[in-house]
């Protein structure tokens, strides 16, 4: 994981890319390096509205480009301000289905100046794939991303 963190840091610190490009590169790297990350993307607070707007991502296209606060796992994280790991999406009553292939999801909030401004969302085609190291890595990524927002 330390090698992956170094590579992620070099993307986020790169002076030649704008924020959007950096986030896209982060998605690509995570998707390439972690086999069970099958959809990797960012959602951000949509202006003053109580909703999330899809940002850079890698994976199958999604209809969920806008997610109201409270709806689905991403919407719940926007309200709870806490990381949410879902080992099996079919056991979760508030799950918004993005793909029939998705079996598990992890969503980690991004804080800037104490405010929840967005999140990273990972879907997996494997039931219960996420380990403590994945959560720690994604929480680290979100902390690093907050520095460039």
Image: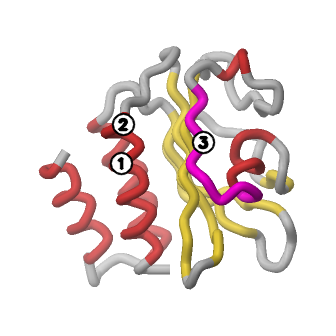
Mark 1 and 2 residues: CB-CB less than 8 Å, in contact? yes
Residue 147 is situated, as x and y percent measured from the top left of the image, at: 41, 79
Residue that badge 2 annotates: 132
| Secondary-structure class at tag 1 | helix
Residue 71 is situated, as x and y percent measured from the top left of the image, at: 84, 45
Within 10 Å of disc 3 (Cα), the crowding (few <14, some 14-19, many 20+) is some
**How many numbered tags mark residues here?**
3
| Secondary-structure class at tag 2 | helix
Mark 3 and 2 residues: CB-CB less than 8 Å, in contact? no
Is residue 77 or residue 148 the one in the foreground?
77
Query: Where are the magenta residues, as a range?
Result: 78-86
**Disc number placed over residue 84 in the picture, else none:** 3
Residue 114 is situated, as x and y percent measured from the top left of the image, at: 59, 79
Left or right of 64 on screen, residue 3: left
Q: How is the image coloured?
A: secondary structure
Mark 1 and 3 residues: CB-CB less than 8 Å, in contact? no
Q: Residue at x 37, y 56 (%)?
A: 26
Task: State how far apart marks 1 and 2 are (Cα).
Answer: 6 Å
Residue that badge 1 annotates: 136
Q: Earlier in the sequence, mark 3 or mark 2?
A: 3
Within the image, what quadrant is residue 142 found in?
bottom left
């Amino acid at each position: 994981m330390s090698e992956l963190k170094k590579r992620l840091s070099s993307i986020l610190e790169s002076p030649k890319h704008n924020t959007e490009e950096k986030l896209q590169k982060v998605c690509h790297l995570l998707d390439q390096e972690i086999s069970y990350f099958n959809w990797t993307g960012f959602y951000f607070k949509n202006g003053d509205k109580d909703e999330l707007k899809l940002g850079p991502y890698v994976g199958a296209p999604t209809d969920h480009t806008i997610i109201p606060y409270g709806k689905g796992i991403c919407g719940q994280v926007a309200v709870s301000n806490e990381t949410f790991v879902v080992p099996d999406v079919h056991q979760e009553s508030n799950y918004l289905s993005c793909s029939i292939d998705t079996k598990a999801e992890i969503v980690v909030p991004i804080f800037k100046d104490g405010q929840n401004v967005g999140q990273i969302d990972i879907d997996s085609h494997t039931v219960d794939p996420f380990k403590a190291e994945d959560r720690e890595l994604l929480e680290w990524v979100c902390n690093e991303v907050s520095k460039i927002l």
